[in-house]
Amino acid sequence: MKPELISFDLCPFVQRSVITLLEKNVDHKVTFIDLANPPAWFLKISPFGKVPALRMGETTLFESAVINEYLDEITPPSMHPKDPLQKAVNRAWIEFASELIGSWYLLSIAKTEETFEIQEADLHKKLSQLEAQLKSSPFFNGDAFCLIDAAFAPALIRLDFTERHANLGLFEGLPKIQTWLQNLMARESVTNSILDQFDTRSLDYIKSTNGYSALRHSGHESAE
């Protein structure tokens, strides 16, 4: 049974599951939909109308963390720590990664300078909290690439995008996060999960909002 991942092309949560599928070397199909005008069949299988959704035959899973845990369980070896306490710690920080993505998104669509600055401050705070949690190792838990790395990669990729185009100093004074990002970007599963022309398409989306964030992102162009 080939898994079918239902996706919106720019969604960071979908990218988490793509990374996991690639890490696990699972043969899969990706179906892109327009979330602004979703097909009727999608609304029937996704209770919240969100992506990603993973179809396994007649059964559909939703929420990226759940999808990734399922994929991990059916394709050993596990990408979770063996120790139950450390596994729980990882799950908690995966939730933090989701909050980080949420803060980045709110910054990206900010209509006013005030809203933009509130979200910018929130991102600086969250990244400082994350830096304090990290060890001096290639990935979150050490040398091994784990589910938590797959969960954080889309967030850090998008923050790096914003840093290159809006120059907010998000990673200044955060050497562990910088090293982690470099190691993630050297991972084949991560680079292969990035949408073609990611920067261009992300900029187009942000600029389409016609808000303050669009102005900030338009002033620092960077090559793909």
Image (cartoon, grey):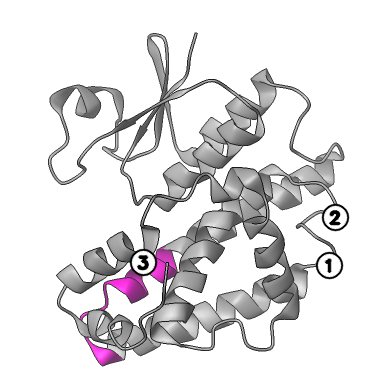
Which residue is at the front of the view, 213 or 64?
213
Q: Position of residue 11 (x, y in %)?
A: 37, 50
Q: Which residue is drawn at 68% across and 21% down?
A: 75
In this rendering, the answer to whether 211 lies above or below 99 is below
Q: Which of marks 3 and 1 is nearer the N terminus?
A: 3
- Horizontal relation, residue 210 to residue 9: left or right: left
The residue sitting at the front extreme is: 223
Q: Which of marks 2 and 1 is nearer the N terminus?
A: 1
Q: Which residue is drawn at 59% across and 26% down?
A: 70
Q: Distance between the residues labelled 2 and 3?
A: 29 Å
Determine which quarter of the picture holds residue 166. bottom left
Which residue was labeled with disc 3? 105
Q: Which residues are drawn in magenta?
A: 102-113
Amino acid type at circle 1 is Lys
Q: Distance between the residues labelled 2 and 1?
A: 8 Å
Q: Which of marks 2 and 3 is nearer the N terminus?
A: 3
Which residue is at the front of the view, 80 or 29?
29
Q: Distance between the residues labelled 3 and 1?
A: 27 Å
Q: Residue 142 carries which label?
A: 2
Which residue was labeled with disc 1? 135
Amino acid type at circle 3 is Tyr
Whether 162 is among the magenta residues is no
Q: Where is residue 219 in the image (x, y as percent from the top left)?
A: 31, 88
Q: Judging from the image, what secondary structure is the residue with disc 1 in?
A: loop
For mark 2, does the 10 Å Cα neighbourhood hold few (<14), some (14 to 19), or many (20 or more) residues?
few
Amino acid type at circle 2 is Gly
Q: Pointer 3 and pointer 1: residues touching (CB < 8 Å)?
A: no
